[in-house]
Amino acid sequence: MPQVHTGSKVVPARERWATQGLDLRTVSACAVLLFLSVQSVVAQRQTTERRRSGRLEGTVSEARSAGKLYLAGARVQALGPITMETKTNGEGAFVFDELPPGTYKLTASAQGMDGEQTVTLTSNQVVRVLLLLKPARVTTTIDVSTADTAKKTPSPVQTIGEKTLTYAPNVNERMETLLPLVPGVVRGPDGHINLKGARNTQSGALVNSANVTDPVTGSPAINLPIDVVESVQVVSNPYDPEYGRFTGAVSSVETKTGSYEKRHFSIQNILPRWRDRDGSIVGIGAATPRMTLSGPLIKDKLSLIQSFEYRFVRTPVNSLPPLQRDTTQESVDTYSQVDLKISPQQTATMSLAVYPQKLQYMGLNTFTPQPATADFHQRGYEIYGQHRYLTGAESALISQLSYKTYDADVTAQNNEPYQLLIDTTRGGYFNRQERNTWRLEGQETYQLAPRHFVGEHELKAGLNATHSSYIGHQVFLPVELIGGSGSPVEQITFTAPTSYGVTQSETAWFASDKWSPKTRLTFDLGVRFDSDTVTGTTHAAPRTGFIVLLTKDGRTLLKGGVGMFYDRVPLMFPAFERLPQRTVWMFDASGQASSSTLYLNRIVGGLHNPESIAWSAAIERQVLEHLAMRFEYEQRNTTKDFTVSPLSSGNAGIIALSNAGRDFYREFQVAARYSSERMSLNGSYARSRAYGNLNDPALFFGNYPQAVIQPDARARLPFDAPNRFLFWADIAGPKRFTLIPVYDLHTGFPYSPWNEFHEYAGPRNERRYPRFSSMDLQVSRPFSLHVRDSRRLQVRVGFGVFNVFNHFNPRDVQNNVASNEFGEFLNDAWREYRGKFVFQF
């Protein structure tokens, strides 16, 4: 059971847990040092035991250019007595050093092309090769070749690669901004990213396989400079049991590896963007300079990648007065990563991410002006370490340890009484918060070499242990609802502020078998066991997937699976009963209190882990040499989801937190990709339905609580978009221009009308915003300039246009039936222009 403590003031709470937090942080630091020390000893032993080694080096180029066009960023792998992997540098070169003698198969892939070559290496020999790449018979998006069947996942997976991250139109220049390029992923009306019909708090978020969600709310809680991100994957219904603690989809970020050979430096966004208000320049609209350094600390042994980004961004609410319409975000995000080649069998990675942020006027919209909004401050960092040990040619042990902190404060602009009027909001925001959290997580994963028994088996097993802590302080101030007459119709008061603390320990272990009884048939079999001290339970989550090559030519693939998933319990839920209680006062026409109801916070039926059963099936077909298509259906049913709802009898009641919630998501998707030498075209249509309980506890007790809690109901979820067309292209234009247009068209999001008491009028979420339609375009071109000492400066210049056709895409609606403007849509997302200048050395 959770350890929950209370107090009446924030200072005693801090003192009560200060010693504990300091001790645990000290222990965490010692654990990291011990981890590195052990790996160092192992490294020395492996170095003394290794045999005389050789060296493989070479270049990667296009076959159709007769070897003259070298490819930078190509992925190269050496398979032999040991397995090593690297990427080509800016000149298309690669190096594998300290390789044991033997026969190696070199494979390379880049830009829809691949190639391979076999070489033999003897002791102390240097072999140089030229790898020529030809267009792959099967595209990188839908790869159904027989040789790679065992490596494919039966889960629906979409990857946003490094080139897309670099060149695609990205209004915020954040990696999460590009996630809607994946069918089934939308940015909801609250601004949060919703993956495959799941709430922001139901999905998983990983960076280099480490959990980066907020332990309190369950939402993603890390900011990385986009320059260090190599790829982002969205995995829906992952049948690999290594994934856990969510009931939706998962986003997985992989960071780049620093260069072991040459130093690289880039700087961009050095010029600020002015704030234009009705044709006049009024201060700075944004300043987002960032710089990234990559290079060897010890050549071919130790590399560093360091990125720094400062962000000052004003985002307008276009329906408010010109100088009172901006939210202001200010942050400093840094990421440092060191990669170490300990020996041919061992590598290690250490990283430090720091992400403080200040968001002024959080919650600003047409009906909540700046004085009535909140300010949100966050402070946090993550220390991460991973060690990879190749125990054989096809077996490996991966150990990782991460420590994450995430502290957050919510404050108000003033202390005036908070009033909800028909058309606006007055006073200072009613909630104050102070949170201090941390999480320590360790994981061991062992991949065995293939075994042969009634086919081929690839076995994998792992263990994960996590400990989290949360110290919080909450203040709720009175709220008044003002009716159409201008007089109060309802008031909500709260008891005294409270302080509390919660700790939680979680463990998980998993085992999986990728079994190929036949060349064209593969099964993914696995099971995962999760337990935690909050619920005091252990859950078994079996999963299975399959991949079948339907045709001998390897061009048609059938895949799918079914699995069970269990979600985490955010730490704000065990502390729910310790939050301030509320009393709702009703007023008559004369302004006098006519009744009152005291609501106590109660956990009904105990806390349980939400669970979901998900399945999917897909057919992928390489129709032509350059054209691939995918037909896919997936469905997820979630039960025991968290929900809150008021229950009352007379003048007494409770705010019930329970696992009574249920939701489901289903999606049918048709996608196609055309890839040629000069362009790639991507198109998809998704027909979906997201339906479930609407009273997500995060709406009322998260970072930005709503004041009024109405009875729960089941309806279409706020981010439901039944029909969505998505098209985007990567076009190599004349004169080295690159053009990437993105067109997104989907059904408007649902909303509900309410009256002056904020009681819902009619069925929930049956009305909708207008259809969303937006065309974005990014155009860029590289230039090469000579500088002194024979060095060259690479410059990339470009510009972006967002909502090219200036389509009416409102973000607010007047849904109060007592308003004269009921049903009016406001806060249109206007067309925007952005320039881009990148300097690289």
Image: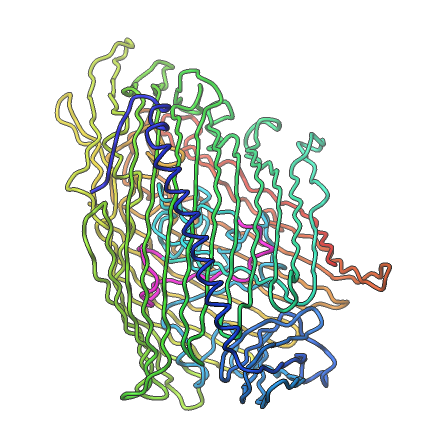
User: Residue at the location (26% across, 23% down)?
Assistant: 582
User: Residue at the location (32% across, 81% down)?
Assistant: 457
From the viewer's perspective, is residue 196 above or below residue 558? above
Q: Reply yes or no: does residue 759 show up in magenta.
A: no
Q: Main secondary structure of the magenta part?
A: loop
Residue 319 relative to residue 7: left or right: right
Q: Reply yes or no: does residue 243 show up in magenta.
A: yes
Residue placed most toward the observer, 571 or 602: 571
Q: Position of residue 617 (x, y in %)?
A: 33, 71
Q: Position of residue 227 (x, y in %)?
A: 60, 55
Quadrant for the N terminus, please: top left
Q: Position of residue 424 (x, y in %)?
A: 45, 24
| Colour mapping | rainbow
Find the magenta span and give its range. Answer: 224-248
Task: Give residue 265's quadrant in the image.
Answer: bottom right
From the viewer's perspective, is residue 13 above or below residue 531? above
Going by the picture, which residue comes out furthest to the left?
A: 649
Quadrant for the C terminus, please: bottom right
Task: Give residue 659's quadrant in the image.
Answer: top left
Residue placed most toward the observer, 467 or 556: 467
For residue 129, say whether it is visible. Answer: no
